[in-house]
Amino acid sequence: MTAHELQPLAHAIRFLSIDAIVRATEGHQGVPLGMAEIATALYAKQLKFNPQDPTWWDRDRVVLSNGHGSMLLYSLLCLTGYEHITLDQVKSFRELGSHCAGHPEYDPKLGIEVTTGPLGQGIANAFGMAVAEAFLNARFGDDLVNHRTYAFVGDGCLQEGIGQEMISLAGHLKLSKLTLLWDDNQITDDGKTELSISENVAERFRVAGWQVVEVDGHNIADVSEALELAKADPRPSMIACRTVIGKGIPRVQGQRGGHSARLYEEDAKAARELLNWPHGQFEIPENILSGWRGFGARNQNTYEDWKARVAALPAEKRAEFERIMRGELPAGWEQVLHDFKRKCFDSDEFPGGIQISGAINQALAEIMPERMVGCADLEAPTGHKGPLQAFTATNRSGSYVHCGVREHLMGAMANGMAAHGGILPLSVTYLAFSDYERPAMRMAALMGLPVKFVFSHDSIGIGKNGPTHQPVEILASLRAMPNMLVMRPADATEAAECWETAMAHRTGPVSMVFARQKLPRVRQAHTEENLSRKGGYVLSEASRSKRQVTLLATGSEVAIALEAQRRLEALGIATAVVSLPCWELFDAQDAAYKAAVLGRDGVRIGIEAALRYGWDQYLGIDGGFVGMKGFGAPGPADALYRLFNITPDAVVLEAQRLLETAGAK
Amino acid sequence: MTAHELQPLAHAIRFLSIDAIVRATEGHQGVPLGMAEIATALYAKQLKFNPQDPTWWDRDRVVLSNGHGSMLLYSLLCLTGYEHITLDQVKSFRELGSHCAGHPEYDPKLGIEVTTGPLGQGIANAFGMAVAEAFLNARFGDDLVNHRTYAFVGDGCLQEGIGQEMISLAGHLKLSKLTLLWDDNQITDDGKTELSISENVAERFRVAGWQVVEVDGHNIADVSEALELAKADPRPSMIACRTVIGKGIPRVQGQRGGHSARLYEEDAKAARELLNWPHGQFEIPENILSGWRGFGARNQNTYEDWKARVAALPAEKRAEFERIMRGELPAGWEQVLHDFKRKCFDSDEFPGGIQISGAINQALAEIMPERMVGCADLEAPTGHKGPLQAFTATNRSGSYVHCGVREHLMGAMANGMAAHGGILPLSVTYLAFSDYERPAMRMAALMGLPVKFVFSHDSIGIGKNGPTHQPVEILASLRAMPNMLVMRPADATEAAECWETAMAHRTGPVSMVFARQKLPRVRQAHTEENLSRKGGYVLSEASRSKRQVTLLATGSEVAIALEAQRRLEALGIATAVVSLPCWELFDAQDAAYKAAVLGRDGVRIGIEAALRYGWDQYLGIDGGFVGMKGFGAPGPADALYRLFNITPDAVVLEAQRLLETAGAK
């Protein structure tokens, strides 16, 4: 089809979007109306996709980074014939239960590659997808993995810091199969972009090593040509598409209101007149629909050929490819961890907590080549590189990404890798910097992506770097996040157990939190059973069946609890120690188990080098707590533990105080 | 002094830093050794400062954005003669209680303008200081306010998204008095910068509208000249200083280890040989010290002249200038809020929660010209512009900063304004996007800066935009942050009261959280007294003195609590409603008050359109809760409240369940 012939197909996006937005009484028309021709050009001639198999592994990925413009994506999925995005679904845009939600919500079966909305996340996810593709392509070759990643993007995504981080690193890594389609409409929510930006955005990309092609975004032929240039260039490409926001609606087009001002029936009518669109509400003429359906059909041979190539693979290679793409773990992975656990238990050397995690990562390196590690310029202190090669512009086989000091991008990259599939992503930095990553972590939790966020330097135990680097509230803020497992192992045994549980956890992200300081052995016996799997367990029972004190602790404070127990028992006070490496898993156990672990008798004391916030769910209002009361301080770790009174003695005193109070009642 | 004569002064920084780091057994030598000449050039000829009056309002501001290089700052403060940074303090570098902490910790009396460490924050603070200066200069003129802001900055700060946001907006706003001194040493913690960046950083600044001057960072004359160029240019300036990391220590200079590898006595010795420095440990020869002391003295006349100009001001202008710079509130400010509160109580119109806050902001506009509002491209939906003019490159009198979609910069800008003084900063966005701002919010809390972080769209009440935009865990994550007040008013009366308390709160930041939806009146009578001041109070007592049920709620859910109370009382169940607009203030009340409010009898139920996490401190383990259990969903607000069962009926059922359980015990 010629560009001229394609124009009505672009209008179909426009009117489907207008009708849905008018019906919903709200929505963001700016993107679907401004990018209709751009999207048409992409789908008509370039995009490798198959509406009959939305999760085809070798499909091109499409990310709507300007997620508020969700009707663009729903229009495309509906017009090209994705099973679940029917016209009825489009009519239910923004209604409760509709697949066509206010913002696109991750569901590859529907054709929605990632959840978007918070700006900048989408293009950073797209970056992660492009890294994943390059890595898998290097391993499996063009025959199996050879696809591109496209992202629709607005001004907001490019103003956000995470967007800027992406621009810088994508250029550095020469991700040639990544293409951005920029909706350069010169309008944001506040009005003209000149309110808040005057730099030449195209030049900014060029400085970062991108190819930039500047086109009229309403000229389908120009956009098509630009997409060809993108495919031919060894750099990532940004197609700067000059557009008119809300194009087609006389009252708002090119105006601030083009972004999301409420649309009415009259607007739909005026647009039909302006664009000479004689068709009724939600009516898509047969010839236009068949045009759209043809774009998927265009890829039929490519799709069949790919399937045939997969089918023709030697059995072992095919099994490995399919295992990885399905996100299944390799045979024997658990044994690696079991062996590690055994070895650590038998050793009398106690490395730093994060170094234990690094050693586990290394132990899994050979058996799990799909593991990719991103780290934000803290390779040495976080120790997760080991024998991994760096992923670079010239070595796509490397599975360690030097992200630079760009934590936010790192987190969103991991999300993109997980959403892409075929990669098991880890993201590594200090716990204090998790706040920089947090918006991406929230998206992982919301999407249910199996990303492992690994953190070191988890408390005042880091010492002299001081309170900027000492988390005190961060465990609480992560535990507060829905669908996020937070693990804080107490020793190498628990670390191995937590890793085992984390690797098997596929329905959401895990935050794996490790101390910088050495973690001495707290387990008194080696067990085949994974005791951490239930999130909490009795590490050391009291000397008498009726407990007087139950000490609940996590991570580096479990050792303090054990020492306090020894002292309390020496005073004749029956004391148990409960380790709680993962609250969320513990909370999911049945009531009887939880009651047995927490103890029905006596008083409870929580011990954690962090704030009490959140602990009352186990301690009750009257329970005791030994931990932090505010921010930390700069000084040696030992001195800080004494300064803040997180010591066995403090636990003993707290226990005695509580027992007296309880006795007095 | 000539550049040649200044060289030994630069070496004094070097050896003070080396000796302190060797003694501390850790530290980051890269910055002080690499930037010694740069800092010397700045202090020798350019910097306007007075060590005898560190908080002189018209001093130039110096920010060490690469805060890990803290010994650079301590060396400068010690050498130039700041009272509190003595040689003994430098010797106690990184010890508990030392002013010379691992990272610089905010204390203007010491000469430390902001806490730095988490990368990118410092240059964004510097940006905020430069905005503050420009605004105050426009109001008070060159005679009173005319100073520059300098920031030392490393590669990490420029890789961080927040740094990129700053580059973009500072160029746009033409902050000509902002100068960055970039330590271009081509090394980060991981090794060579080429591991993670290949863009031309200087060009990236030029694209954003900065003057860039490229110099040899070890050539004092060149740096001095560049500083002159910076002063002469209408753009912000970035002085790209090519440096050798760790310069002076043969074993590590120019290497990855130059950054922070442990230094030993032998390194100090080798450096002394290499640089021909015959002086002993911590020894500063008299002539060198007097050179350094002369830099402060150079400014003596400027300082005295400024003081004389202030003294000569007309009484009223002087009083206003001093009031503003001291951060004192204007006479009559409380009356404005009292009048607003009265007016709102009498009105039967109930605007959206955030619109109430906007109206208060507007009411204060005239009386409090020092208030500056930053907003991240959400002017219309957050309603805090009102009659404020925009602060732009050509209108420095504007007090509304269109930050673009750059929440992180916005938060750090507010911190910089507060640290600068003379500005009462507000930072406005949706609550869901507070995560983007969070690292800056943490710094505000850590520094104890009086920043108001205003948030709208605080729950599922936002409706159809869906779970990406619906906070459920964010109240908990903010309440978990030390030294952060979190306020969530239930109606216009509480909003006015919370504003009053927030404005008067000077020792830390406040998060002011407002609903998007309308907030009907919950107060049954107007009171002169600020009932919200104590953080929680009995809004509606039970019909009998012995309560059976106490409902605890915040914000938009207080109205639900009141309706549930009505229904429960109709069933003969004595029910009280407690409003808890600010937990932190409530927690600070005495035990008797808290017990009286929370109630000694009956059962308790928390009601909040958010997760339970954190609520158990008031509810106990056995208390009831009506709220969210996970992420939200896209749909109309009313439908979502029903879907998630946050309704008066749900509260009634929960009360009945708890009363039965309690009765059964």
Image (cartoon, coloured by chain):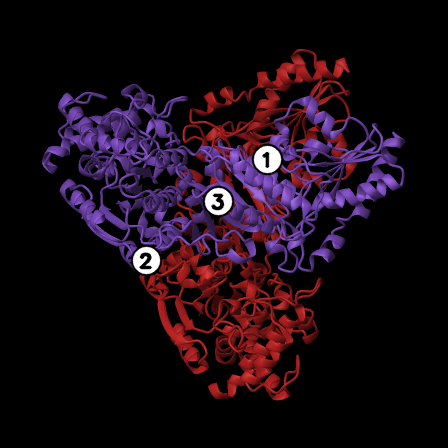
Chain colours: A red, B purple
Label 1 and label 2: CA atoms lie apart by 50 Å
Do circles 3 and 1 both sit on a common chain? no
Residue at (79% x, 47% y) in the render: B648
Name the quadrant of the C terminus of chain B. Answer: top right
Q: Tell me which amino acid carries mark 2.
A: Ala
Chain containing the residue with disc 1: A
Mark 3, residues whose alpha carbon is within 10 Å: few (<14), some, or many (≥20)?
Answer: many
Q: Tell me which amino acid carries mark 1.
A: Glu
- Residue A237 located left or right of residue A264: left
For disc 1, the marked residue is: A494
Which numbered tag is attached to residue B208?
A: 2
Q: Position of residue B559 (x, y in %)?
A: 73, 45
Sequence-wise, the earlier of marks 2 and 3 is: 2
For disc 3, the marked residue is: B426
Name the quadrant of the N terminus of chain B. Answer: top left
Q: Nearer the viewer, mark 2 or mark 3?
A: 3
